[in-house]
Amino acid sequence: MDDIIKQVKFDKTGLVPAIIQDHRTYMVLMMAYMNADSLMTTINTGITHFFSRSRRKLWQKGETSGNIQMVKKILYDCDGDTLLVQVEQVGVACHTGNRSCFHRGLYEKDGVPDIDKSPLSGIVNKVFDVILERKNNPDNSSYVSSLYSSGVDKILKKIPEEAGELLISSKNNNRSEIICEAADLWFHTLVLLGYHGLTPQDVYKELEDRFGVSGFEKKKKEGKKK
């Protein structure tokens, strides 16, 4: 373990900045500081730990909220004075309820693509961020907040309702209605994911794992498990 610490150049206060990144989407989630103890604790537990400069103590990400970060890989830059920690984020990284602490725009050049890998994942993540914001900071005028305040039964009820409307629009071969109803179903599914502390990234990963695998073979394996 001493060999690991020797490779990192801590500043004169004994700290090193650590950039936390989603290991699947490469989204930058947050930045915090580590000292030697928090770095070793992170490695030994597999969960991110940092050093609070204001409280002068170690702290575990998600210790009270449950939004822990499970470490997949730790890299360090060419100068050895900055860490890049790739994690699997449970829930959200930001205390505001947003997926990433870097959710406020300061400058953007026209024509530059979003941080996400595709327009689809970008808009889904943006919608999900708003959903989590409404969940964590309830607003009486918010439809999403009303769903969460009503409980899981209300959320579950909306899934078959929206699926039924999608079926009807498909039966009627109404393209515009199919699009609208599919969007409604996706939206309420995101609300359900948020209720269970899951994210679109969890679904992306499942789809990624299935990619290139025959659906028939998958069903055969599932049948054997049962």
Image (cartoon, grey):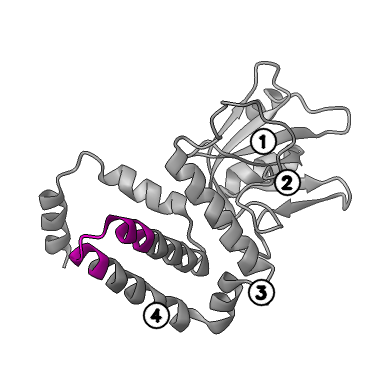
Q: Give me the disc on residue 19.
A: 1
Q: From where the camera sits, is residue 196 visible?
A: yes
Element carrying mark 2: strand
Instruction: Give the spatial CA distance, label 4 vs label 3.
Output: 21 Å
Residue 94, horizontal then vertical, whole percent: 68, 52
Residue under label 4: 157
Q: Quick one: label 4 or label 3, which is nearer the N terminus?
A: 3
Amino acid tagged 3 = Ser
The reply to whether dot 3 and dot 1 touch (C-beta < 8 Å) is no
Instruction: Give the spatial CA distance, label 2 vs label 4.
Output: 41 Å
Image: magenta residue range: 168-182
Q: Quick one: label 3 or label 1, which is nearer the N terminus?
A: 1
Q: Quick one: label 2 or label 3, which is nearer the N terminus?
A: 2
Instruction: Give the spatial CA distance, label 3 vs label 1.
Output: 36 Å
Residue placed at 17% from the left, 60% from the top? 222
The picture quadrant where one finds residue 223 is: bottom left
Q: Is residue 154 above or below residue 188?
A: below
Residue 117, horizontal then vertical, whole percent: 46, 35
Residue under label 3: 141
Residue placed at 46% from the left, 39% from the top? 119
Amino acid tagged 4 = Lys
Instruction: Give the spatial CA distance, label 2 vs label 3.
Output: 37 Å
The picture quadrant where one finds residue 112 is: top right
Q: Residues within 10 Å of mark 4 (few under 14, many from 20)?
A: few
Instruction: Give the spatial CA distance, label 2 vs label 1.
Output: 11 Å
Q: Quick one: label 2 or label 4, which is nearer the N terminus?
A: 2
Q: From where the camera sits, is residue 90 visible?
A: no
- Frontmost of labels 2 and 1 is 1
Residue under label 2: 50
In the rendered structure, does residue 170 fall within the stretch colored magenta?
yes
